[in-house]
Each structure stands twice: as C-alpha cells, then as structure tokens.
C-alpha cells in the first residue's frame, strides 16, 4: 500500500523517480525500491515524503484512508474551490 501511494503521489505531480530522489536527497534506486515494495522509507524519509506531498505519514502507511491537503497560505475562496473540486472528483467515480 505504501509503495502504491508513493508512486501515485509522484506520478500525480509528473515527477520521475529521479526527480523525487533529488528532492529527498536519496538515490533513484531507493525510490524505485520503495515503489516496488522491496523496502520501506526510513522514518526520516517518511516524514520528508509526507511534507513534500502534503499528506500525513498515516496516509502513506495506509493507516488512514483520507489524504490531507495543505491549504496554508490560501485564502478562503481558494480553499472553497479546492473543496468543490474534491467533491466533484468523488462524485465522478
């Protein structure tokens, strides 16, 4: 589950494994190993991933189902637009 979530979050941003690795200051092979489910991110990398993707560590680990979006710095109108978009996406499934 963690592997799938890391891959999905990376791909949603249009990043390659190498780009994610650069952002985390690790090797591309490390990212590939996570996404293949061969290894798990260290606790430090897990926190860094959560910050980078604006999700909780619980989400990455599959403990919680809901993804959290960091809306810091957005005004109320922008937050409302994001909430509407999320509702539409849920309805379309």
Image (tube, grey):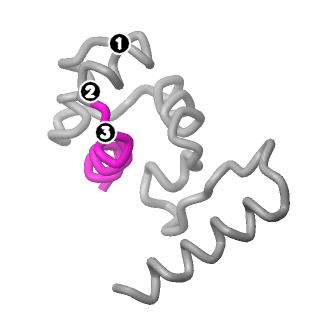
* Magenta segment, prevailing SS (helix, strand or loop): helix
> Which residue is found at the position 47% from the left and 25% from the top?
45
Distance between the alpha carbons at the discs numbered 1 and 2: 8 Å
Determine the secondary structure under disc 1: loop
Dot placed on the residue nearer the N-terminal end, 1 or 3: 3
Please, which residue is most extreme toward the bottom here?
91
State which quarter of the image contains the C terminus: bottom left
* Vertical placement of residue 57 versus 85, above or below: above
Q: What is the crowding at mark 1: few (fewer than 14 residues within 10 Å), some, or many (at least 20)? A: few
Identify the magenta region.
1-15
Distance between the alpha carbons at the discs numbered 1 and 3: 18 Å
Q: Which residue is mark 3?
A: 14
| Contact flag, marks 1 and 2 (Cβ < 8 Å) | yes
Does the stretch in magenta take in 62?
Answer: no
Q: Nearer the viewer, mark 2 or mark 3?
A: 3
Does the stretch in magenta take in 4?
Answer: yes
Pinpoint residue 22: horizontal percent, then vertical percent: 37, 13
State which quarter of the image contains the N terminus: bottom left
> Which residue is found at the position 35% from the left and 48% from the top?
12
- Counting labels gives 3
Q: Which residue is mark 1?
A: 26
Nearer-the-camera pick, 55 or 57:
55
Q: Is residue 37 shown left or right of residue 91? A: left
Report the disc number at residue 73: none
| Contact flag, marks 2 and 3 (Cβ < 8 Å) | no
Pinpoint residue 28: horizontal percent, then vertical percent: 22, 18
Q: Is residue 73 shown left or right of residue 51? A: right
* Vertical placement of residue 36 versus 30, above or below: below
Q: Which residue is mark 2?
A: 31
Q: Is residue 22 shown left or right of residue 83? A: left
């Amino acid at each position: 589950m963690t592997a799938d979530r890391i891959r999905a979050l990376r791909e949603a941003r249009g990043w390659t494994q190498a780009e994610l690795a650069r952002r985390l200051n690790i090797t591309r092979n490390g990212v590939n190993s996570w996404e293949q489910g061969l290894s798990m991110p260290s606790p430090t990398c897990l926190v860094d991933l959560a910050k980078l993707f604006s999700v909780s560590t619980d989400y990455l680990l599959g403990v919680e189902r809901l993804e959290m979006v960091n809306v810091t710095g957005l005004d109320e109108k922008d937050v409302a637009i994001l909430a509407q978009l999320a509702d539409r996406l849920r309805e379309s499934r």
